[in-house]
Amino acid sequence: MGQGEGDWREQLRERLFDQEVLVRINAFFLTYFGWIAFGVLYGVIGRWSANVTGDLLRLPFTSREMVVSLVSFTRHVPPLYYLFNGVYYLGFAGSIALVVIYVLVYMRDLETSDRLLGMYLTGYTVAGIIYLLFHVYAPHVVYNLPGYSSENTLFTRQEFVFPSLHNTFITINIIALWKYRDRLGGKLLILINSLVPFATLFLGHHWIYDIIGGIVLGTIVSRLPMKWGVGASRSLYRMELSSLQKVTAINLILVLIVLILAARPERAVELLGNLLGNT
């Protein structure tokens, strides 16, 4: 085992006994669960949201010809297609996880972590309010492109398009990571996040206006004061370390379950049916 690998394992063990780190990890878990809950409830509370897709289609760069040509070009360049697919499906929950792990667990940058939490929560809140007021549908839904699902999953809802949360969060991530642009980890994460706007456009998941809206929202959010930091989860500090470790493990398992169910919702329904049938 190399020295670097041993150092990393020792550092990871230290973080598992670091209350400051564990509190913040659980705060990020809670924000993500909150967004998932909003997505589920949106089927009820979002029924009054106005569909303005028709208005968006009056704008330039929204034609079927343009969308199909971008998607067709990407599919005819397999390395680019697989790269963009990987970046897109990593782009939301994955990018959050990677940035939090790097900033909080690896660098133990508590100040940046607190700002990230505040920016994520603000981004969720503003985007959620917009989705409740009005929504548009993605290019692949509007033009019924083959190979795409129009079903809602725990990953996303088809109404959550403008502004693009993918691009809101990658903008927040890049701004937060900019202080680490001279480090290898920082460079790699900035590069991965920088590819997300292209992936969302060239795969037909977002209109160019969604991308611009997401970048603008992320930029505005990053300029707001986030001094309250992790205060929303301050009650976690009252837990003993052993209890906090157990809560962290449970939340991690729940996140993994959510991601598995989101990736294969039909399998989740089948498993649930089997469980109910056996009871």
Image: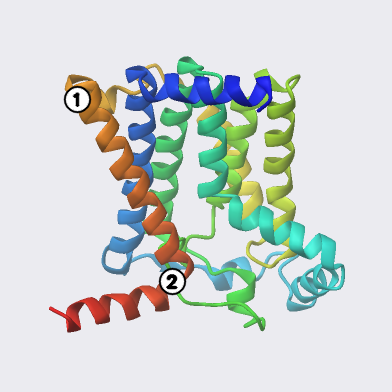
Dividing the picture into quarters, in which one does residue 275 lie? Answer: bottom left
Residue at 71% over, 66% down: 203
Q: Residue at x 35, y 49 (%)?
A: 253
Separation (CA) of disc 1 from disc 2:
34 Å
Above-or-below relation of 151 to 186: below
Say which quarter of the image contains residue 185. Answer: top right
Amino acid type of disc 1? Ser
- Residue 52 - label: none
Q: Position of residue 71 (x, y in %)?
A: 77, 71
Quadrant where the image shows the C terminus: bottom left
Reply above or below: 164 against 53. Answer: above
Residue at which label 2 appears: 152
Q: Total number of numbered labels? A: 2
147 over 212 or under it: above or below: below
Q: Which residue is mark 1?
A: 235
Left or right: where does residue 276 sit relative to residue 263? left
Dot 2 crowding, Cα within 10 Å, few <14, some 14–19, many 20+: some
Image coordinates for residue 168, horizontal then vertical, percent: 56, 43
The percent position of residue 243, horizontal first and vertical second, equals 20, 29
Q: Is residue 65 left or right of residue 104?
A: right
Name which residue lies at 40% across and 65% down: 261
Q: Secondary structure at mark 2?
A: loop
The three-letter amino acid code for the residue at tag 2 is Asn
Quadrant including the N terminus: top right
The residue lying at 41 percent from left, 78 percent from top is 266
Helix or strand or loop: what does disc 1 sit on?
Answer: helix
Q: Position of residue 60 (x, y in %)?
A: 74, 64
